[in-house]
Image (tube, coloured by chain):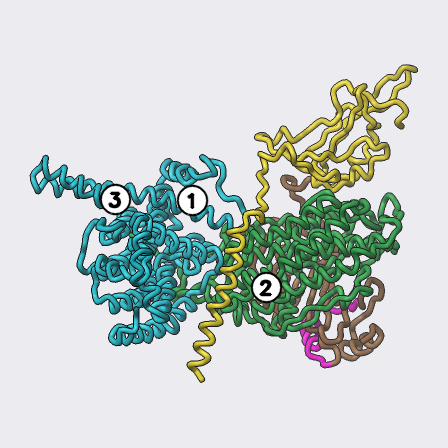
Chain colours: A brown, B cyan, C yellow, D green
């Protein structure tokens, strides 16, 4: 499907979604509370069939966080980017690791790097950071490590 | 003609002239013990350098080439290194069993030396059940491996030991059946008798097709019994780091290492004795002239030549094949080698009764 | 037909093993195929490719002059702080003060050989050397000063 | 007395494979729960060489960040660099000269072969066959020498700049590459004799580590791992970059879904790479090897995503730019990280020996996973 067709289809599924062109893919902004049901529809809808989550990450905008999900369909080869704003304090969003199982590790990474709490995640523990890590989440913009970071 | 047995007889006579019979026995036992231990050391050195060179050439490498001429003293340097290394005993280990295991391994391989005929009329113990003795004692070696694996208190070691236990117990059967086929043909368990029965040709040539099958089964079984690749599951380094000897270091590790190589030598010596005629030169039926010429080559050379040929075969396998998985290993034994071995034994028996062999 | 399949299976397996054995035997007997490099022994004949990026050096001519103006373009270009340039003011023959390098400090232990400093350099003062034996016993030996003592900037290099 | 440590309530053994273990080729740490020889659970513990490259890149300029990615998947470092350069070029609309494109693609494919060679040898070694390792390294050494001549380094090439390549190809490049192709074509049949056809190897691989097509997609696998499950996913075909759309090559697909299928995909991919190199080696267009670029690169405000096909799968670079000289946020989608997530699913219920085979065919490079 082209971006235009995708837009129409997705507006049907989730009227509150807003679109953003620019970049390589169609960007869709959604509310974080809609995410789980919307993700299920994206995955199961026969004409969309977004079965492949190829990138899951988070961006720290200082005032808020944004979860970014890159989705593609191995059947139709169309791509979309889902973005969802999260609060800076105690960010939380539903997990999608039941739908795309690769999300399990990716969400654990985002959890420790940005402190995003993934609701209903089966195994939300530190993955990369050492056990008993205390302090800020490293990829946040206000993280500072005076010992190990070399300032240029 | 010069031969080892002449020297042995001369020593015996000289001792008999100078000492009483009891002392002669004591001295001869001491001499035999020293000889066995030095043979151990020499074999260890030779086989390690041989393995390293064989593997290197198959892997388009040069291999050890620094210590001594063409790197021939490399294994001596290795030994020195292992000797000066600290022999650690891990904290949680069962200290007594942990230290006992390597010695048990070496003692078992020493015991196996006894009934092997190294040259014409030259063996430590002319035992009338030599073949049975060998298969009985070689099964004991599994105890040392189990002991090492258990006492290390390491999960890798334990799993290695358990694998090894299952493997040696299984492959003992096939090796036994393969040996039996020769016993059936000769009608004797005595090593010397078996060798003499090959005076008109080795069994591998006299025995037709069934003996070849026995020989192949025997080769596979002994490779498995000595825990060599492709059956080195007990020490599969990519799975269990080093298996049962993960926790061993220094000389204790070296003893396991030595025992492995000496075991290879012994099983190959037995294979050579059973199938390739031991020290018996290459004889063909009644070609007296040809046989006579062959007799000029010393019998010890024949024995060592054949044994090292088999050792080379086993090394060749090791550096060519990937490792089997534990269930495939047991499948191979119980689904392939054992049934084939049994049917083959039947064939050999029929052949022996009907006198089809040469 | 179980028996036939069984026998076929066994012979197929043995054949596949024999093929592998033949290949290793080929290499066992063909020593010309050996590719081992005897490294410290072939040092005399060993020649690195002329583009090999070993370390950053600053060529000096016979008059002990280099081409570095101390513009710090390389320091800016470096992704990981490998280069530190310490400048000083020199009084030249006409009595004018002129900026020149005091020390060109190069941390080999940080260098990723990305060549960005050499691309950035406007006066071709530094280049990559083809050395590769960099191991030393103390990390501090890897911090080098590239300009030789008492070296001067070449005439005409701005 | 011997203490019982590291067992579960059911009496299952818990074993640490790694961070220092002969099978993990790096510092991967797997905690596996075992019932006898059978694996019940595999749990990866990462971070032993995490350098936080994403954070580092936030303070590096668009010229500098390219070379950091060499240190991620060090076996396809050239392809990683290529992806980063493509992203910058796409965002800034830099036209890359045809000669530079051809050179990049040639070196990409050489890198791919070198990476697969190393994988082949290392995987054989995991399975207990030592000899193939050295045979693979003989061919890989030739590629390394070609790389050394042209790029000046053997592993982390650092040869790509936004807008082209660092230098023109070495005068010997064409000759040496042709020599390599000739040698490789002779030797690749030996791979079959040594390993592929071997009955022990076949049994170790067939039916081991089954990853059905649905699971492979769900786990986000890419590259040979996904193609071994019969899903077409080659970035070079679906989202062609550089001159891949003009080249003749076949996307290798196997439908076995097991370790053998993944193995065969990689072996056949090497031949396809040779095919690509053969098409290009005599037809490298004349011209510049570098486009004129500004001294300071500034990406326009926005978000950019670029993917390339590395030897391990789809490598993605996601850049959020605020219009400055450094990225605001950068995310590397590394193929190994996603492929690793499938390991637990694949390994459950199989033997320890199979785990080694699975890890071998997933072709894990640990710095790629840890970043």
Q: Position of residue A139 (x, y in %)?
A: 68, 52
Camera-nearest residue between C75 and D347: D347
Q: Position of residue B279 (x, y in %)?
A: 29, 53
Which residue matches tag 2? D341
For the question of whether residue C39 can be seen, the reply is yes
* Image quadrant occupied by the N terminus of chain B: top left
Camera-nearest residue between D229 and A61: D229
Q: Is residue A2 above or below residue D326?
A: below
Q: Is residue A84 left or right of residue B308?
A: right
Q: Position of residue D73 (x, y in %)?
A: 66, 53
Q: Secondary structure at mark 3?
A: loop
Crowding at mark 3 (Cα within 10 Å: few <14, some 14-19, many 20+): few
Q: Is residue D187 left or right of residue D242?
A: left
Task: Give the chain of mark 1.
Answer: B
In terms of image quadrants, where is residue D363?
A: bottom right
Q: Secondary structure at mark 1?
A: helix
| Dot 3 or dot 1, earlier in sequence | 3
Do dots 3 and 1 share one subunit?
yes
Crowding at mark 1 (Cα within 10 Å: few <14, some 14-19, many 20+): many
Q: Residue at x 51, y 57 (%)?
A: D126
Q: CA distance from mark 3 to mark 2?
A: 73 Å
Q: Position of residue D57 (x, y in %)?
A: 73, 48
Residue segment shown in magenta = A27-46
Q: In the rendered structure, find residue B1 and report the number of the disc placed on it.
A: 3
Q: Secondary structure at mark 2?
A: helix
Q: CA distance from mark 1 to mark 2?
A: 44 Å
Which residue matches tag 1? B49
């Amino acid at each position: 499907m082209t971006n235009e067709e995708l837009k129409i289809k997705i507006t049907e599924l989730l009227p509150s979604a807003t679109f953003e062109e620019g970049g390589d893919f169609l960007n869709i902004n959604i509310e974080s509370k809609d995410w789980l049901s919307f993700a299920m529809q994206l995955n199961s809808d026969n004409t969309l069939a977004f079965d492949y989550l190829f990138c899951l990450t988070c961006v720290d905008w200082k005032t808020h966080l944004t979860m970014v999900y890159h989705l593609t369909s191995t059947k139709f080869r169309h791509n979309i980017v889902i973005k969802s704003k999260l609060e800076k304090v105690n960010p939380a969003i539903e997990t999608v690791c039941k739908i795309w199982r690769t999300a399990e590790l990716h969400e654990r990474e985002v959890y420790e790097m940005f402190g995003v709490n993934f609701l209903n995640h089966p195994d939300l523990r530190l993955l990369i950071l050492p056990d008993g890590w205390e302090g800020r989440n490293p990829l946040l913009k206000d993280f500072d490590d005076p010992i190990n970071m070399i300032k240029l | 003609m010069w031969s080892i047995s002449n020297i042995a007889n001369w020593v015996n006579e000289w001792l008999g002239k100078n000492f009483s019979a009891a002392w002669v026995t004591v001295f001869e036992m001491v001499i035999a013990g020293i000889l066995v231990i030095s043979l151990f050391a020499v074999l260890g050195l030779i086989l390690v350098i041989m393995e390293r060179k064989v593997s290197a050439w198959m892997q388009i490498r040069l291999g050890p080439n620094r210590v001594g001429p063409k790197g021939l003293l490399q294994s001596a340097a290795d030994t020195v290194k292992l000797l000066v290394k600290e022999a650690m005993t891990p904290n949680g280990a069962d200290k007594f069993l942990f230290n006992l295991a390597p010695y048990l391994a070496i003692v078992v391989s020493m015991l196996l030396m006894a009934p092997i005929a190294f040259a014409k009329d030259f063996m430590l113990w002319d035992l009338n059940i030599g073949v049975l003795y060998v298969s009985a004692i070689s099964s004991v070696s599994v105890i040392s491996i189990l002991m090492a694996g258990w006492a290390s208190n390491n999960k890798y070691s334990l799993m290695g030991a358990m694998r090894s236990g299952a493997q040696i117990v299984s492959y003992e059967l096939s090796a036994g059946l393969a040996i039996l086929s020769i016993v059936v043909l000769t009608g004797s368990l005595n090593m010397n008798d078996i060798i003499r029965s090959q005076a008109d040709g080795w069994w591998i040539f006299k025995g037709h097709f069934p003996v070849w099958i026995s020989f192949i089964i025997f080769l596979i079984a002994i490779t498995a019994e000595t825990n060599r690749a492709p059956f080195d599951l007990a020490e599969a380094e990519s799975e269990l780091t080093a298996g049962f000897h993960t926790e061993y270091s220094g000389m204790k590790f070296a003893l396991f290492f030595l025992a492995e190589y000496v075991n290879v030598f012994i099983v190959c010596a037995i294979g050579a004795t059973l199938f390739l005629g031991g020290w018996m030169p290459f004889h063909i039926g009644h070609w007296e002239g040809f046989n006579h010429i062959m007799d000029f080559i010393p019998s010890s050379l024949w024995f060592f030549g054949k044994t090292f040929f088999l050792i080379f075969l086993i090394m060749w396998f090791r550096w060519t094949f990937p490792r089997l998985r534990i269930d495939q290993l047991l499948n191979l034994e119980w689904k392939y080698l054992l049934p084939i071995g049994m049917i083959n034994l039947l064939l050999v028996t029929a052949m022996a009764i009907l006198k089809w062999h040469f | 037909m179980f028996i036939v399949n069984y026998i076929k299976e066994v012979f197929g397996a043995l054949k596949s093993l024999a093929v592998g054995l033949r290949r290793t035997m080929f290499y066992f007997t063909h020593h010309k195929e050996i590719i081992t490099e005897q490294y410290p022994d072939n040092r005399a004949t060993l020649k690195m490719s002329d583009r090999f990026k070993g370390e950053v050096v600053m060529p000096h001519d016979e008059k002990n002059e280099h081409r570095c103006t101390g513009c710090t373009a390389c320091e800016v270009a470096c992704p990981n702080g490998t280069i530190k340039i310490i400048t000083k003011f020199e009084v030249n023959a006409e009595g004018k003060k002129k900026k020149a390098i005091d020390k060109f400090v190069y941390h080999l232990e940080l260098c990723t050989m990305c060549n960005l400093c050499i691309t950035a350099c406007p006066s071709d003062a530094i280049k990559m050397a083809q050395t590769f034996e960099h191991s030393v016993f103390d990390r501090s030996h890897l911090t080098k000063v590239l300009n030789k003592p008492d070296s001067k900037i070449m005439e005409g290099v701005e | 007395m011997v203490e019982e440590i590291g067992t579960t309530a059911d009496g299952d053994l818990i074993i640490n494979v790694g961070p220092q273990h002969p099978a993990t080729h790096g510092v991967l740490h797997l905690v596996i729960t075992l019932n006898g020889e059978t694996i019940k659970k595999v749990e990866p513990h990462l971070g032993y060489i995490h350098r936080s490259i994403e954070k580092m890149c936030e303070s590096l300029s668009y010229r500098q960040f390219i070379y950091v990615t060499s240190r991620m998947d060090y076996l396809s470092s050239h392809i990683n660099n290529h992806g980063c350069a493509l992203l910058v070029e796409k965002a800034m609309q830099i036209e890359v000269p045809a000669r530079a494109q051809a050179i990049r693609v040639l070196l990409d494919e050489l890198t791919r072969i070198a990476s697969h060679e190393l994988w082949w040898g290392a995987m054989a070694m995991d399975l207990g066959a030592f000899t193939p390792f050295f045979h693979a390294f003989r061919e890989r050494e030739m590629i390394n020498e070609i790389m050394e001549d042209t790029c000046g380094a053997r592993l982390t090439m650092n040869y790509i700049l936004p807008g082209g390549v660092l230098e023109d190809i070495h005068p010997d490049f064409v000759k040496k590459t042709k020599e390599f192709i000739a040698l490789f074509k002779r030797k690749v049949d030996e791979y079959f004799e040594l390993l592929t056809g071997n009955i022990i190897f076949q049994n170790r691989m067939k039916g081991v580590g089954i990853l059905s097509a649905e699971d492979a997609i769900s786990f986000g696998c890419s590259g040979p791992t996904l193609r071994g499950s019969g899903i077409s996913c080659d970035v070079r075909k679906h989202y062609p970059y550089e001159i891949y759309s003009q080249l003749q090559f076949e996307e290798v697909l196997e439908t076995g879904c097991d370790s053998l299928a993944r193995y065969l995909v990689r072996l056949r991919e090497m031949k396809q790479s040779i095919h690509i190199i053969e098409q290009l080696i005599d037809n490298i267009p004349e011209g510049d090897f570098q486009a004129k670029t500004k001294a300071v690169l500034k990406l326009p405000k926005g978000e950019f995503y670029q993917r390339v096909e590395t030897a391990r799968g789809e490598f993605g670079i996601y850049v959020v730019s605020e219009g400055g000289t450094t990225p605001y946020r950068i995310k590397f989608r590394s193929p190994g990280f996603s492929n690793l997530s499938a390991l637990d699913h694949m390994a459950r219920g199989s033997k320890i020996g199979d785990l080694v085979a699975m890890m071998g065919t997933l072709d894990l490079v640990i710095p790629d996973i840890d970043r």
